[in-house]
């Protein structure tokens, strides 16, 4: 099991979800290579592009982000995504624990529209994620 008891995780989660905050993403990393304790290592307001650059190729991490997109000329939507990152240089034992640990992370980062499994930064390009969010959102007036 992953240790997600650090109160700063819930604080950062609520900050990302708050309409009153500019913070729109958070990053959870393991305390060390041998630890299963997760900590908030970064937050930001630069959107998915900034979050994508925050991931480390040698680590497994979790990201949570608010994605804002236009559905048509008249409206904007905000949806949340959960990112499960497994970098190309991530150690084998860490990779083996990810599925179990993801369930623990979902207990804290509870509300999101889609889960994105990312192995490389291209998996976090905004356009394909927005297409997935539109499909998950139900009502689509622009044929997507």
Image (cartoon, helix red, strand yellow):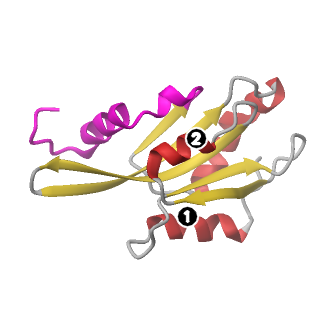
Nearest to the observer: residue 130 or residue 117: 130
Residue 121 image point, x, y percent: 54, 30
Residue 109 image point, x, y percent: 55, 56
Decide which of tag 2 and tag 1 comes sooner along the chain. Answer: 1
Q: Dot 2: what SS? A: helix
Can you tell which mark lies on residue 13? Answer: 1
**Is residue 15 depicted above or below 65 in this figure?**
below
Nearest to the observer: residue 52 or residue 81: 52
34 vs 119, left or right, is: right
- Count neighbours of disc 2 (C-alpha within 10 A) and say few if under 14, some if 14 to 19, many if 20 or more: few
Can you tell which mark lies on residue 53? Answer: 2
Quick check: marks 2 and 1 in contact, CB under 8 Å?
A: no
Q: Nearer the viewer, mark 2 or mark 1?
A: 2
9 vs 83, left or right, is: right
Q: Determine if the magenta segment contains residue 143.
A: yes
Can you tell which mark lies on residue 97? Answer: none
98 vs 93, left or right, is: left
Quote the CA–CA distance across marks 2 and 1: 19 Å
The residue lying at 25 percent from left, 55 percent from top is: 77
Q: Determine if the magenta segment contains residue 98.
A: no
**Is residue 73 depicted above or below 5 in this figure?**
above
The residue lying at 45 percent from left, 65 percent from top is: 17
Residue 27 image point, x, y percent: 63, 52
Which residue appears farthest toward the right when viewing the image?
34
Residue 80 image point, x, y percent: 41, 52
Magenta stretch bounds: 118-144
Question: Image quadrant for the C terminus?
Answer: top left
Which of the 4 image quadrants contains residue 18?
bottom left
The residue lying at 70 percent from left, 43 percent from top is: 101
**Is residue 6 depicted above or below 60 in this figure?**
below
């Amino acid at each position: 099991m992953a240790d997600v008891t650090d109160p700063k995780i819930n604080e950062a989660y609520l900050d990302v979800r708050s309409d009153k905050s500019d913070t729109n993403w958070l990053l959870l990393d393991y305390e060390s290579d041998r630890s299963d304790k997760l900590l908030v290592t970064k937050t930001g307001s630069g959107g998915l592009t900034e979050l994508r650059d925050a991931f480390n190729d040698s680590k497994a991490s979790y990201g949570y982000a608010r994605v804002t997109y236009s559905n048509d000329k008249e409206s904007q939507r905000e949806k949340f995504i959960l990112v499960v990152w497994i970098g190309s240089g991530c150690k084998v034992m860490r990779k083996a624990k990810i599925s179990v640990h993801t369930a623990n992370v979902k207990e804290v980062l509870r509300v999101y529209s889609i889960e994105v499994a990312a192995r490389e930064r291209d998996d976090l390009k905004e356009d394909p994620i927005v297409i997935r969010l539109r499909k998950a959102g139900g009502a689509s007036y622009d044929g997507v």
